[in-house]
């Protein structure tokens, strides 16, 4: 008999995140179809979730990640990104 408490897949846990964070770019890479991208980012296990801000990796999660942890990492990256944009504005204005 199947267990109804089986953990959700990462895709299921991510459902709706793109709507909640419209300014964040989400990409999903199928390493079987795009091994070159997986190698470029050092992905060796799936699922692997990478979070970036300003072109720099700010978090890496291997395996299924809890949605709250993922949202916290996105929030942190968004704040870093906003701070970077503010610093750029300060430099341009300064």
Image: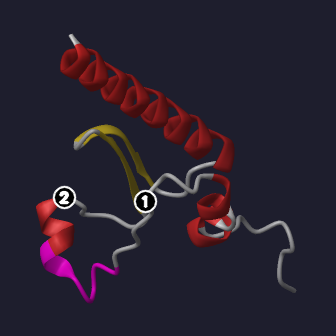
The residue under label 2 is: 41
Q: Is residue 12 left or right of residue 4?
A: left
Q: Compared with residue 88, is residue 34 higher up or lower down, i.e. above or below?
A: below
**How busy is the neighbourhood of tag 2: few (under 14 within 10 Å), some, or many (20 plus)?**
few
Q: Is residue 59 left or right of residue 10?
A: left
Q: Compared with residue 20, is residue 46 higher up or lower down, i.e. above or below?
A: below
The spot of residue 35 in percent (x, y) is: 18, 79
Q: Quadrant of residue 32?
A: bottom left
Identified at 71% across, 64% down, the residue is 7
Q: Quadrant of the N terminus?
A: bottom right
The spot of residue 19 in percent (x, y) is: 66, 62
Looking at the image, the residue that sits furthest to the top is: 94
Disc 2 secondary structure class? loop
Disc 1 secondary structure class? loop
**How busy is the neighbourhood of tag 1: few (under 14 within 10 Å), some, or many (20 plus)?**
few
The spot of residue 65 in percent (x, y) is: 56, 51
Task: Indicate which disc residue 25 carries.
Answer: 1
Q: Is residue 52 left or right of residue 41?
A: right
Q: Quadrant of residue 94?
A: top left
Identified at 12% across, 63% down, the residue is 40
């Amino acid at each position: 008999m199947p267990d109804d408490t089986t953990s959700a897949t990462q895709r299921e846990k991510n459902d709706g995140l793109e709507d909640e964070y419209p300014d964040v770019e989400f990409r999903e890479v199928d390493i079987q179809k795009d091994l070159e991208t997986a190698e470029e980012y050092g992905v060796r296990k799936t699922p692997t979730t990478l979070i970036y801000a300003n072109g720099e990796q700010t978090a890496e999660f291997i395996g299924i990640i809890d949605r709250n942890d993922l949202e916290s990492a996105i929030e942190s990256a968004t704040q870093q990104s906003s701070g970077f944009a503010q610093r750029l504005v300060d430099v341009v204005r300064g």
